[in-house]
Image (spheres, rainbow, N blue to C red):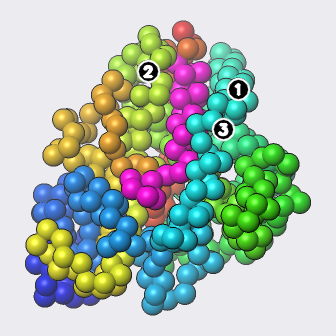
Amino acid sequence: MNRPDTLNVPEMDIDPFSTDFLAMPYPDHERMRQAGPWVWLKRYGILATCRHAQVKAVLSDHVNFISSAGVGLANFNQEAPFRPKSLILEADPPDHTRARTILARILSPKTVAQIREHFSAEAESLVDRLLARCRDGAVIDGVKDLAEVYPLKVFPDAVGLEPEGRHNLLLYGDMIFNAFGPRNELLQRAAEKVQPVTAWIMHHCQREQLRPGGFGDLIYQAADQGEISHQEAPMLVRSFLSAGVDTTVNGLGNALLCLAQHPDQMEKLHADPGLARSAFEESLRLESAVQTFFRTTPHEVALEGLVIPPNTKVLTFLAAANRDERQWPEPEKFDIQRRAAGHMAFGTGIHACVGQVVARLEGELILNAIARRVKRIELVGEPVRRLNNTLRAMSSMPMRWIPA
Ligand code: OVM
């Protein structure tokens, strides 16, 4: 698609949703960052940025860069959304504000204090069980045995979901995060499984399916108070089930891979398990689970000398902002003692991840539990990637933990 005359930015032929790109995105991120603050990706007819300052500027400006037209490639003003729109992710103020207020209250630091004990006990016992297997000489899988297991236990527990059928959450996550990209083969394949998975998800968004007092039930209580309608309540539960699992699964998987690939950093973490939180943060910066999000211009937008036409899709590369040398000294270096604050892995602005306190809790507890017991993580086979249009994801990571 042609670059508008008013947009005097470099044109590039990079396809950020191709198999090659998704398998190794960082060299192309660097090419785009070097080309300029903004680039035009002709294949999709979109404006894109890989620099920290510009990603932050777009995400901080919800008036000129809206979410209600979708935060993927599809423009919901021009084509129907692939599922009913999220009341929080794919909304602008004032609609967004109502939903956000409720979710922010449910996912507050006060809530975290309440769930911490359960989340901690589960982290300790899972890591104990896996270490026992390693002591027996077994190989464990960092993805299948840990990264997928822990978030699938603790978060749905907190939401108040029954134990049966939770694997549907991973299938659903794979689908919706693929659906932020183009209708390529990845989305096609994920979408083949969508019918029964969606039915399971929506069924479990019903009040009767949710444990009284859990996060899901709290949304219905907000509806009882008149904050949202009872028709809207299941849709907000759906947001928990959409955003709360695949993100943390891959956040944990990526953190484990970073520590396995950097034995010196694992050694530091073992020497001081108090670094667990900062190690998780640094892995979010270096290997952001959510790599990209889009915004859309609702009207002509003048910015940094550019004149962006209405209905332009703008792609923000969160993961590239997190490796921008203009922002980070030695950006490619995994350094668990660096100040990774200010990274874009959770986004920023009014749509910044509302669940980030829970995500950080999970990361901290797992890395801390490992740090106190394990001095080295050895990969014993090639880690296998799971390609997804939006997520940086792993499907398998055979490893052995060397006990302290
Ligand atoms: C939602 C939703 C879905 C996917 C991701 C997300 C990262 C939110 O349905 O609200 O945030």
Mark 2 = which residue? 275
Residue type at mark 3 is Thr
Q: Position of residue 318 (x, y in %)?
A: 35, 55
Residue type at mark 2 is Leu
Verify whether residue 359 appears in magenta: yes
Query: For the point 10% across and 72% down, which residue is it?
Result: 305
Query: For the point 69% across and 44% down, which residue is it?
Result: 155
Foreground residue, 190 or 226? Answer: 226
Mark 1 = which residue? 117
Within-10-Å neighbours for mark 3: few <14, some 14–19, many 20+ = some
In the image, residue 236 sits, relative to residue 72, either above or below, namely above
Q: Nearer the viewer, mark 3 or mark 2?
A: 3
Query: For the point 40% across and 48% down, which residue is it?
Result: 345
Within-10-Å neighbours for mark 2: few <14, some 14–19, many 20+ = some
Earlier sequence position, callout 1 versus callout 2: 1
Which quadrant of the rendered structure holds the N terminus?
Answer: bottom left
**Quadrant hosting residue 152:** top right
Residue type at mark 1 is Glu
* Disc 2 secondary structure class: helix
Q: Position of residue 185 (x, y in %)?
A: 50, 74
Point out the stretch of residues depicted in magenta: 348-371
Within-10-Å neighbours for mark 1: few <14, some 14–19, many 20+ = few
Query: For the point 36% across and 26% down, which residue is it?
Result: 336
Most common SS among magenta residues? helix
Q: Which mark is residue 111?
A: 3
